Amino acid sequence: MSSRFLGRLGVSQPLVLAPMSGASTPALVAAVCGAGGLGSHGVGYLAPQAILDDAARIRALTDRPFALNLFVLPDTFAEDEPAIDFARATLDALMEREGLAVRTSLPERWAPRFSDQFAALCEARPAAASFTFNLLAPAQVAELKRRGIAVIGSATTLAEVRAWADLGADAVSLQGAEAGGHRGSFLHAPEQAMIGLFALLRQAARAVDVPLIAGGGIMDGAGMLAAEVLGADASQLGTAFLACPESAAAQAWKDDLTRAQDVDVATIRSFSGRAARGLRNTYVEAMAAAEPRLPAYPVMNALTAPLRRAAAAAGRGDLMSEWCGQAAGLVRPMPAAELAATLLDEYAKARQTLA
Ligand SMILES: Cc1cc2nc3c(=O)[nH]c(=O)nc-3n(C[C@H](O)[C@H](O)[C@H](O)COP(=O)(O)O)c2cc1C
């Protein structure tokens, strides 16, 4: 069955590859597009030119519609110096204890400037653009629409769904509490905004008329059909694609996912200063007591970036941010095109069984 929203974009299957900053790649996006779904690329960590370069790489691999995704952030950030000093001392001590030869440093910028990233995204002109962490300004929504780019807002609560619908989003992507990666919450504290996908989807389906894309813990065709039955226009899967060879997740992260159990997945603030779902590992346990005193996103994220890179290079999954959703244990390490085809086949068979 083709989705109301995706059908308008020229996408034939109700499958969206979740944007995954640090893990999605042009090859992963193109594989999902090739299977008939909508591939999304998380470009929130990329500088403007890199966004343009990745869009060109996707276009070199597929002529199908795709989406780009950004974190909506202010252009400048508050710098809490005592928190920064505390974080650096705590991280450096941990790395020394763990034998990782890397120390924190102060970056040139805490994160790329959002307004420059937004301009690059407009220039790249994907078929759709999705946004998380906050709402866009009305003028930015108008600018995207003027360029023919469909706007997808991310929401973790009913109020956030309504806010995007009121802003004129073409679709709203629901991030259930099960979902991997950073919590997109912007109207409520993350701990208040942990609404399970079932609860969020039914409430949103009754409250708004805008097409809904369901995300959080969906790992197979049965999950996709369940989301559709509950009122979703399409399903957005992130964790399911993390262990594909095309994913940029480090090998140690991929290996740990295949062994993950539901109880291993926690909400973690210590890697980036913002609540995110991932595996509880050595780093998470060691930093738990320090969490309340760490700087906010994106400062903490920038401070831990060199450590996370060094951990990946050393094969130390236990010191990396191993983002994943609560159903990570169902991950299937196979080429992305094969996984997308398998998902769509399972979905079609589940539909037949239900009919
Ligand atoms: C590694 C990883 C990175 C993510 N990065 C982003 C991102 O850059 N932008 C975004 O809107 N969502 C991001 N997400 C959240 C996904 O869009 C989506 O909500 C989630 O993957 C759905 O749950 P699932 O992981 O259980 O499939 C990320 C998720 C993961 C696992």
Image: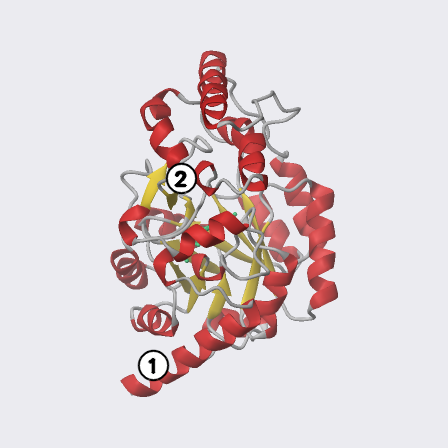
Q: Which mark is residue 186?
A: 2
**Image coordinates for residue 253, horizontal then vertical, percent:** 48, 48
- Quadrant (top left/top right/bottom left/bottom right) for the C terminus: bottom left
- Number of callouts: 2
Residue 216 in view of the camera = no
- Residue at the top extreme of this rendering: 82
**Residue at left offset 47%, top offset 33%:** 272
Give whichever of 208, 31 is nearer the camera. 31
The local secondary structure at tag 2 comes to loop
**Image coordinates for residue 89, horizontal then vertical, percent:** 47, 16
Q: Which residue is mark 1?
A: 350
The local secondary structure at tag 1 comes to helix
Note whether 111 is above or below 343 in the view shown.
Answer: above
- Disc 1 marks a residue whose amino acid type is Ala
- Disc 2 marks a residue whose amino acid type is Phe
| Between marks 1 and 2 in the image, the one whose residue lies nearer the viewer | 1
